Amino acid sequence: MSPTFASLSIRNYRIWAAGALVSNVGTWMGRVAQDWVVLTELTDHSATALGIVTGLQFAPMLLLAPWTGAVTDRMPKRALILMAQATLGVSALIGGLLVVSGAAQLWHFYLLALLTGVATAFDNPARQTFVGEMVPAERLANAVALNSASFNLGRLVGPGVAGLTIAAIGSGPTMLANAVTFAAVIASLLLMRPSELTPAPRSARRGSVVEGLRYVRSRPDIKLVMVLIFVLGTFGMNFQLTIALMATQVFDKGSQEYGLLGSVMAVGSLSAALLAARRGEPRLRVLLLALVGFTIASGAAAVAPSYLTFAIALAACGLSALTAMTTANAMVQMRTEPSMRGRVMALYMAIFFGGTPLGAPLVGWIGDVLGPRWTIGIGAAAVGLTLVAVSAWLIRREDVTVSYESQRRPHVRVTVRPTQIMPEAAK
């Protein structure tokens, strides 16, 4: 089997990947339909309303992270994922029925977004750490990358299908289709062989939440990754909002063209995930260079003069952003003790997605006041300035050298000499 797909040789992971792919396609269909309903059916293209819905979906990740991480380390992860997926499916079903019946109001979507956020706050750390129970340690990075590939394959197919189904049968039936796809993940979990799983040691101590925070605080290498991922998630990864605004207000496009933009961006993301699956051990230099690429690509998207050039820039944004996210995720998981992984990954997901409740309403307000292009430009500026600050800190504190070699195969080399400040930072 190709090294890119090595984890698929494991039966439990193969079943999981199949179910997750179906669910991911449905999830992206549901997201596009939800945003379309909020923008065009419940409001008059209100960026602020869409920002609030997006923020409510991610706020629980920020508020509940220490607790959900502790629950993940103390409960069987498969059972926890089953409960969370059932809740997410019911939420999607209610939203679809409200739209189909014509009874939907904006406050309904605010409440459903909050319910989805609570369920996701439990689901995300459990899903992230459950990968380590399905595959051996030497294939963890590969499995993490394949999870990202599955997510972005869903992102590639889902928005395009959503655009077609919204135009053909309406947004309500599209949301109902998403509700049905949750059955795929539930079925995959029930079909697994528990005897072939390798559960991580479970914590039984009540002080486990505090222990998780102390563990992260004692690891400068993990904290550095979390700072970078916080800025990227808070200001740079608001494409659910920014693509909708650019498509409808700047380029005056309909639901099909809007859905296509999400698929175009997913082409770059899927390519990055597959490349990451072949890469092996994640490195700090890959994370930093990916964020440089994201700064350039998102800046180009913000000033794109046409729909076509905007789409091309989005593909580059997807490639660089997914490279950064996959690398950061694998770095944190591989550097964390298995017994602490649930709490650490809950904090990681809270920092990455939990910044959205702060960033999304702000970005939505910027879109209403300064225009849609600034909703992307602010992300490029924030990530770029953070990179400058982090680079200066690394050069001053960690004895980092950067060199460019042009002979034979040109490449940039970032060398970090491990110190007590940043032990075993990717060399």
Image (cartoon, grey):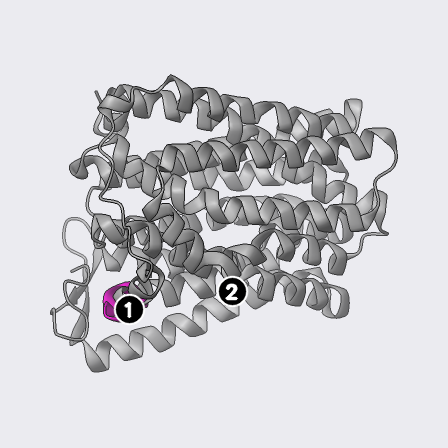
Quadrant including the N terminus: top left
For this rendering, which residue is in front, 169 or 311? 169
User: Is 136 in front, or is 368?
Assistant: 136
Residue shown at the point (46%, 27%) measured from the top left: 21
**In front: label 1 or label 2:** 1
**x, y percentage for residue 290?**
36, 55
Image height check: is 210 above or below 245? below
Residue at 18% x, 57% y is 406
Q: Is residue 238 magenta?
A: no
Residue 378 placement: quadrant:
bottom right
Instruction: Indicate the position of residue 124 as horizontal and vertical percent values.
Output: 44, 45
Q: Secondary structure at mark 1?
A: helix
Q: Which mark is residue 380?
A: 2
Q: Amino acid at mark 1?
A: Arg
Is 314 on the left-hand or right-hand side of 177? left
Q: Please state the extent of the stretch shown in magenta in the rendering.
A: 216-224
- Viewer can see residue 337: yes
Sequence-first disc among 1 and 2: 1
Name above or below for residue 353 compared with residue 263. below
Residue type pointed to by label 2:
Ala
Residue at x 59% of width, y 44% of height: 311
Other residues around mark 1 within 10 Å, as few (<14) / some (14–19) / many (≥20): few
Which of 279/133 is in front?
A: 133
Q: Name the quadrant of the C terminus.
A: bottom left
Question: Percent position (x, y) of residue 241?
Answer: 65, 52
**Does 93 sit left or right of 210 as displayed?**
right
Residue 214, which numbered label? 1
